[in-house]
Image (cartoon, helix red, strand yellow):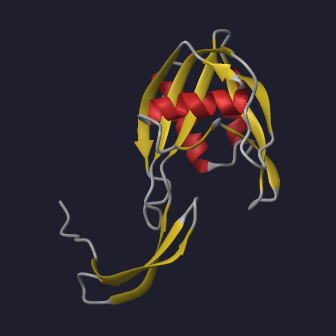
């Protein structure tokens, strides 16, 4: 067991706030007495990723432009949990339907992780969807354009190794959910 202790926050102020993010500047004192000021904390709402499998063992994935990278990426469906979502499973089912136009026979929670606990306050929840099938039209947010792709599960490890899936939390969600579904072992 370690003797590590949290920093003491002596002051805190919000330096930016909008509908997507709040940036907080904390004045901190480490257990050693070192002053860390400012330390910026990014306050995001929780996110959800959906690892969706069709009955013929294909993953329902998205191709979407990501502005910070300036590239189109292969990703999992998902997004920000809304205040109206009862839980991550409900939020995952909603995001999955909106982004892909698919539904699923079963949705279940796999794991909750922290994308970057050094600077982010939020968690990312992984939801496994089994029996995914088309269920209606996609419903995009402002600026969203998403192409749905069905990827054979047998190809996913190769695609990850080749860098086709670049978002690290998506890679973690894929591996943990596919293991939970019995499609891969590690």
The N terminus - image quarter: bottom left
Q: Is residue 159 above or below residue 10?
A: above
Could you say which is closer to the camera, residue 113 or residue 96? 96
Name the residue: 51% across, 43% down.
Answer: 81
- One can see residue 184 in this view: no
Q: Residue at 68% of width from left, 21% of height from top?
A: 102
Q: Position of residue 159 (x, y in %)?
A: 73, 36
The percent coordinates of residue 57 (x first, y second) are: 65, 14
* Number of residue marks: 0
Whether residue 80 sits left or right of residue 97 in the image: it is left
Q: Position of residue 107 (x, y in %)?
A: 49, 21
Residue appearing at x 60%, y 34% in the figure: 95
**In front of the other: 101 or 41:** 101
In the displayed structure, 148 sits above or below 58; it is below
Residue 155 is drawn in which quadrant?
top right
Q: Can residue 96 be seen in this snapshot?
A: yes
In the rendered image, residue 139, in percent from the top left (x then y), is placed at 73, 33
* Left-right relation of 116 to 36: right
Toward the front, the furthest residue is 84
Q: Quadrant of residue 172?
A: top right
Which residue is painted at 81% across and 42% down in the image? 145
> Quick one: which residue is furthest to the top in this view?
55
167 vs 46, left or right, is right
């Amino acid at each position: 067991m370690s003797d590590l202790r949290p920093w003491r926050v002596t002051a805190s102020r919000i330096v930016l706030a909008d509908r997507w993010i709040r940036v907080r500047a904390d004045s901190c004192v480490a257990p050693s007495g070192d002053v860390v000021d400012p330390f910026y904390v990014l306050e995001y709402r929780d996110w959800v990723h959906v690892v969706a499998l069709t009955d013929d063992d294909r993953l329902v994935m998205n191709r979407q432009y990501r502005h910070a990278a300036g590239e189109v990426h292969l990703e999992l469906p998902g997004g920000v949990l809304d205040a109206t979502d009862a839980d991550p499973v409900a939020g995952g089912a909603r995001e999955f339907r909106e982004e892909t136009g698919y539904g699923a026979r079963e949705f279940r929670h796999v794991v909750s992780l922290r994308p970057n606990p050094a600077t982010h306050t939020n968690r990312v929840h992984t939801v496994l969807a089994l029996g995914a099938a088309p269920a209606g039209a996609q419903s995009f947010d402002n600026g969203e354009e998403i192409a749905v792709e069905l990827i054979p599960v047998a190809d996913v490890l190769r695609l990850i190794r080749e860098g086709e899936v670049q978002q690290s939390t998506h890679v973690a969600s894929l591996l943990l959910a596919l293991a939970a579904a019995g499609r891969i072992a590690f």
